[in-house]
Structure formats: C-alpha cells, structure tokens
Amino acid sequence: MAMRPQSPESAATSASELQLGASTSAALDLVSAGAGKASPGPASAPVSERPWMSLWRIFTLNRKAMVGMCIVGFFFLVAIFGPFFIHTDPSALSNDVLVPPSPSHWLGTTQTGQDIFSQLVVGTRVSILWGLATGLVVTAISVLVGLCAGYLGGIVDDVLSLLINVFLVLPSFPLAVLLAAYVPFKGPLTVAVVITLTSWAYQARVLRAQTLSLRRRDFVEAARSSGESTWRIIFFEIFPNEIAIVAAGFVGTAIYVILAAAGLEFLGLGDVTVVDWGTMFYWAQNNDALLLGAWWWFAAPGLCIALLGAGLALINFGIDEVANPRLRSEARPSKRLLRQMLTRSVGTGTAPSGASHSLG
C-alpha cells in the first residue's frame, strides 16, 4: 500500500503532538506549525525516543501516579535499606511488656516485650519483596497463557480457555486457604505458590480477548507474510501493544497478592516464626491485643498495608489515564507546557498571532 510523503510542517506537527501528549488539539496545531516553519529540517532528538519521552512526561505529570510512586518508592527504600539500621532483634524478648509508643519504643511493644518498630521494618522487606515477586510470576503466567490462547486459536485456545474458565469460577481465596492448610511445608514460598496457582486466570482472560482483536491487524498480517516465527509475532509484535494492560494487571495483582498473603498468614497458614506484616496480625490476634487495648500492635502493620495498597492503586489509575486519554483529568500541566512553548515561539517570532486564544 502506497504511503503519502509528509511535508516538514506535518512531520513537525505529529512529533509535537507525540511529545506533548496534549488534549488541546487546536493549540498543538498552531504551535507545531510554527515549529515547522522555524526548523523544517530533522529534529534534534531521535524520533524513536519521543514516544517513551512522551509517555514518561505524561506519567510524571499525572498527580495520582506521582503520589503512588512516592508511596511505593518509600516502602521500597524501607524494605531495602531499613533492616541495616535496625540493631534490635525483632524476635528478642524483654521486660517492657505492652508498652505504648514512647521515645524508647517508637511503636510500642508486644505482650512478650518485642519491639514493634523493628518488626515492622524487618517485615516490610519480606512482605513487599515476596508480594511483588509473586505478582510478577502471576503476571508472567497470565501473559503466556492469554497471548498463546488468543493468537494460536484452535485446539490450543479451547484447552487454555477451558482452564481459564475453570479457575475463574473457583473462589480464589477460599481455594488458597484450602491448599495452604494441607501443604506440609509452611513459609513465604508456600504462600507465594498457592497465590500464584489461584490468581492468574482473570488477567489471562483479559489478555486473550485483547489478543483476539489484534491477531488480524495489518501489522500482524505483514509480519506473518514476511515469514516471522510465531513466538516472535506474539512477543515482539502483539505483546508491545498490550504493555499498558499488562502493567495495570501487574499492579492490581500485586495489591491482591499482598493482601492475600497477609490474610493467609493472619489465619496461621504461613510460617509464624517469620517476621512480616501478616504474622504480626497473627500474634496480635492470638494474644488478644484488641481486648487488651494494645492498638499499636495491629495498627502499625494495618496502616502499612493500607498505604501500600493505596499507592499501588494510584499507580494503577495513572496507568489507565496514560493508556486512555479520555480518562485524563490533569489538564493544567499540559496547558502550562503549551504556554511555555508558545512563549518560546513568540520570543523567536514564529508563533501565530491567535495561538494564545486557543489555550483558553
């Protein structure tokens, strides 16, 4: 199919729209038209880098995503570097029994004198790293099953769709409780395996539906006609077009995994000797922390789980808004960026006279 050559003005216009990700099309046309008159030659930055630069700019300008990344980044820093600053054994017993938060014990102590702050910091590493690693494995299985079922079709699609439907109708958390109760070995690895087996089906279903809509597109037919292998078409042609869905699914899966792991350990189905947020709930419930008024015992891990879940949810909302421009509500940063470009264009004498009125 023949392609019409683009003039320098139209090429600069499309590059500016890709770089800004703006929702005000009239202003972008005027700005990019002026830029095309000023510099009809090739752009200084490579065109291949501009989509990623535009994606990063839109993502960082999104307030929800920025707040979510700050929250999750804080917990990552605590998980990686926090235990190096804790010089108290989180399992060590002392005579300070049920001491409320104080300068000597920032988050109080347990019924056996264990310091809750040291338990919280050390347990952050176990909870976050195991939770995100499990979410990554669940996402990988979902991507593999969903893309293969959607692209290959035939008997492969029938078998994989049957498997997906079976796991979809099964209640995932009760099934995870049942499996974890009968596994002889307890620990974070057991909890991760159980959650992985019961949590992959929904995202696989979504990716299968998206792959079915992409398998007959022109770029896939062109790759198939040129002799590309099946796996290369799946992972290098179709998969990049589903990155936003996969990223949103990974964040949502990570939220569920962290909550499910804490729930299973709260029920005593994990290794209660491992210090993490779920086992802190378990010991607080077993030692009647609520009846004794030791609110600091369960409030600290509960607040951490709530904050981490909120941060991941905000990142998920940000990914949705970046992937779907209709959901974007952050119009002010884009307008401010447009005004800066208009100011620069006015300074060089290339901006049209009515460009400022299109910004509103």
Image: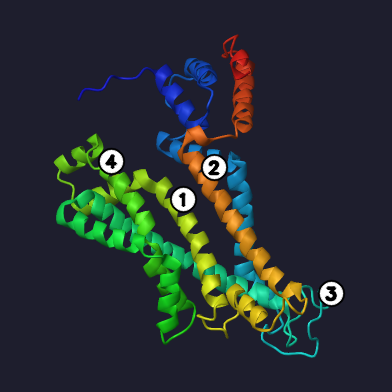
- Looking at the rendered structure, the kind of residue marked 2 is Phe
Looking at the rendered image, the quarter that the N terminus falls into is: top left
Vertically, is 6 above or below 202? above
Query: Mark 3 to mark 2: distance in Å?
Result: 40 Å
Which amino acid is tagged 4?
Answer: Ser
Which mark, residue 213?
A: 4
Circle 2: element type: helix
Residue at mark 1:
248
Task: Tell me the distance, in whole angstroms, between the alpha carbons under discs 1 and 3.
Answer: 40 Å
Q: Which residue type carries mark 1?
A: Ala
At horizontal 70% and vertical 69% (from top left) the residue drawn is 300
Q: Nearer the viewer, residue 86 or 44?
A: 86
**Is residue 119 placed above or below 229 in the rendered structure?**
below
Let me know if residue 73 appears in the view.
no
Q: Does the residue at mark 3 contact the one at mark 4 (Cβ under 8 Å)?
A: no
Q: Secondary structure at mark 4?
A: helix
Marks 3 and 2 in Cβ contact (< 8 Å): no
Q: Which mark is residue 59?
A: 2
Alpha-carbon span between mark 3 and mark 4: 59 Å
